[in-house]
Amino acid sequence: MKPNQFLLIVMFVVSFGHNSSVLALNSNEKKQNEVYCKNFQSGSFVNQCSSGHTSKFKRLDGVQVQEYGNFYLKEKNVWTAPCEYRNTLLETNDPEIRLYVGNSISIKMVNVTKTSYRTIEANSGDKNIFCEVKKIGEIEPSTTL
């Protein structure tokens, strides 16, 4: 075997072993995120977006109600994957958003921790638009939103 052939084989084995470790790490990280994501299916939250929008919202039993200033949004909340959900606007008193009643937005959760996550709009090509969501409390199961 020529020295260059040996070096190439060693590099392949080292690289392959490294890639396997990275895949295992990514797999473990994904599983941990999925565990954390379940924590956000209900509760009270604070939402701060890169656009400057700030709001509080409550989520329970497939309904999400968001409040900002004197306005509110009521949305149907459907979980489509462990760390992804779709919100459909049901009603609002915000005149700038009323035209969008019935429209949906798909959200992907990233940078998930025990108490917070970052949102990315699944249908948006702009990765600069995001929100930071922090859980601030639980909601009693008997609560109606």
Image (spheres, helix red, strand yellow):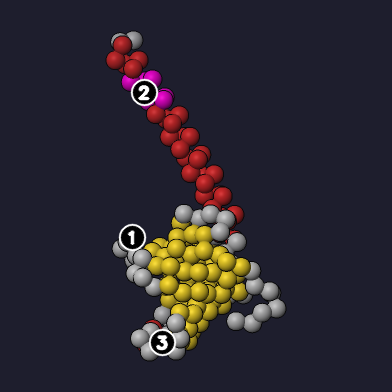
Q: Distance between the residues labelled 1 and 3?
A: 26 Å
Sequence-first disc among 1 and 3: 3
Q: Name the residue under label 2.
A: 11
Asked whether 21 or 57 is in front, the reply is 57
Magenta region includes residue 9: yes
Q: Which of 86 and 129 is in front in this view?
A: 129
Task: Name which residue type carries label 2.
Answer: Met
Residue at coordinates 45% horizontally, 86% vertically from top-left?
70
Q: Position of residue 99 (x, y in %)?
A: 37, 87
Q: Residues within 10 Å of mark 2 (few under 14, many from 20)?
A: few
Say which amino acid is labelled 1: Lys
N-terminal label among 1 and 2: 2
Query: Which residue bears the numbered disc 3?
Result: 94
Q: Describe the element under mark 2 as helix, strand or loop.
A: helix
Please name which of the two marks, 1 or 3, marks the residue nearer to the observer: 3
- Residue designated by label 1: 127
* Residue type beneath disc 3: Asp
- Magenta highlight range: 8-14
Q: In this view, does 60 lie to the left or right of 7?
A: right
Q: Is mark 1 on a helix, strand or loop?
A: loop
The crowding category of the residue bearing disc 1, from other C-alpha atoms within 10 Å (few below 14, some 14 to 19, many at least 20), is few
Q: In this view, does 127 lie above or below 1?
A: below
Residue 88 at least partly seen: yes
Q: Are marks 1 and 2 in contact (CB under 8 Å)?
A: no
Tell which of 67 and 29 is nearer to you. Answer: 67
* Residue 110 vertical placement versus 72 (above, below): above
